Amino acid sequence: MTKEDATNSSERENVAAASSNDNSTLIQAEKKANDATNTNTNAETNGAQSTANKSESNSPQPHGIQNSEDAADAEEQELITRMRADAVDNTMYSKKFILQTLMTLSQQPEQTALEVELEDDLCKLWDISVTPEVVAFLLENDVIELIASAISISEDVRLYEILIGLLGNMCAQVECVEQLTANAEWIEMLLKLTTCMDTCMLLQLMRLYQYVMAHVVSGKEQLAIDWYNCFAACDSSAKNLGFILQQSVSDELLIAALKATNAVLASCALVEEENAQSDHNLRPFAEVFLKQELCDGVNNAFVRLMRDDLAKQADEIDGEAGDQVTAEEDGEESNDEPNTPKINCDIEVIQTYLNICTILVQLPEAQASMDLYASNIMYCLTRILIFLQQPMQLLPLGERQEEYLEDLAHICSCLKYYYDKGTFVHILNVWLILREHIENYAEYDENDFDAYEDEPRSQYEENAFKLLRLLGHMVIQVDASVIMTDIEEIDVIKVELFRNALQADQDEDALLHRAHQRLSAVLNSAAGQAK
């Protein structure tokens, strides 16, 4: 199977090859025109010389020159006319090439390997299918039905990849999605393809899902309902997405699958909400998507993508496919140490995970079975908090970081402030970073070349207070014996700063007052036991 870099290289070569026929035709036309021009020029020169050397008697030469010019012009015009007639709308792409390729595909024998020539032509067609005019022409010639038929009679995963990639390009146009959605069997085919474990094909399938869901949320109500019903009718649809997320060792596929899962969940959750009081009788969202396999797959994929650089290096050397995250959960690691492993992750992955998690934890059914999901989710949140403690990831505090903290607090509230030692400690560490920044906050001085324009101080204070309340909730919820043991392992200075902050704000917030009382009782009890 090819990797993405190989696929990209192939696609660039295919783009060049796709237009080679047209370019050669144009070159021939230009050559003929140039030849005709050269002939005319030579003829005119010879005619002039002949006129100078001979008398002005009747000569057939000028009449011959004129006939030659007319013939060349007519031939060139005929060639241009034929080319324009063969072009797809105002493009330079050939209708004849497209139709011949589709015809060859339709004649492909069952259960046979894809021939090299057909593969090359299909790749050219895949490349040019990003053009709206080509998409319209393909739809006019029932290409979706042809694709579905070709997939149904073949087991060639390379053919699957090309055809799903072609269809994915086409789905950028809403007309294609409407035609695709009109046939439930075609949607069912796409849902069943998630059981194919070919990485390259699945990449194209996940991309197709994203294009389709983008149109679903753009106001196309019937599209949304039809796709929701197809997901609901296919009991394994959510489970299959979960299997991809659990079993794949390709980071590229995991990212694409997370994005596709996010798009599907967000779109379908919106569809259910908007049609809750309608006559469509949609199957409950939780019954369709709240599957153990999907939840585990999302968490496992995210943990793998958030592994540190040492774990990634170990993957490359040893070829290990399992999760190799080895970061400490007790929170006592220092991210300032030069040898501390760093998490290098696409920030879009973090937001995608938080979006998925937010959708699922809000479900009453998920909260009722919190024990199944909470510990894994809290571990994922801990990875995000560790990431934020790395240089340049939290400060300066921008919109992205605020969204992370807001989603994190919301997820914890939906989980009823489930206590996890690692999560608690790293929330405390992030809060201390914000607190220190607030204490050292300096107004921007435009005359200081080393200074940078920071966010308002109030923005840091609001987010620090949000984290302080989150810590307070956890202190209140956790069993006294558990928090006593964990507190003893945290740096004394950090604990004292935390208690002082709770005390300072307790008069304005009843929650912080309760948290301060609880923490003080725990610390006093621990001190008494120490004596």
Image (spheres, rainbow, N blue to C red):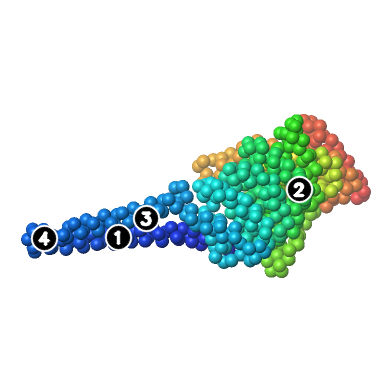
**Residue that carries the numbered disc 1 in the rendered image:** 34
Quick one: SS at disc 3? helix
Q: Nearer the viewer's eye, disc 3 or disc 1?
A: 3
Seen from the viewer's position, the closer of residues 136 and 440 is 136
**Amino acid bearing label 1:** Asn
Residue marked by disc 3: 79
Question: SS class of the residue under badge 2?
Answer: loop
Mark 1 vs 4: CB contact within 8 A:
no
* Residue identified by numbered label 2: 234
Instruction: Work out how far the residue at label 4 is from the one at label 2, CA to CA, in angstroms.
Output: 87 Å
Residue picked out by circle 4: 51
Real-space Cα distance between discs 1 and 2?
Answer: 63 Å
Q: CA distance from mark 4 to mark 3?
A: 35 Å
Which mark's residue is nearer the viewer, 4 or 2? 4
Q: Amino acid at mark 3?
A: Leu
Residue 427: percent from left, percent from top: 75, 46
**Total numbered circles:** 4
Q: Is residue 270 left or right of residue 32?
A: right
- Find residue 158 and report its image quarter: bottom right
Disc 1 is placed on an element classified as helix
Give left or right: position of 214 versus 33.
right
- Which is nearer the eye, 498 or 2? 2
Local packing at callout 1 (Cα closer than 10 Å; few below 14, some 14-19, many 20+) is few
Front residue (pair 65, 181): 65
Q: Quadrant of the N terminus?
A: bottom right
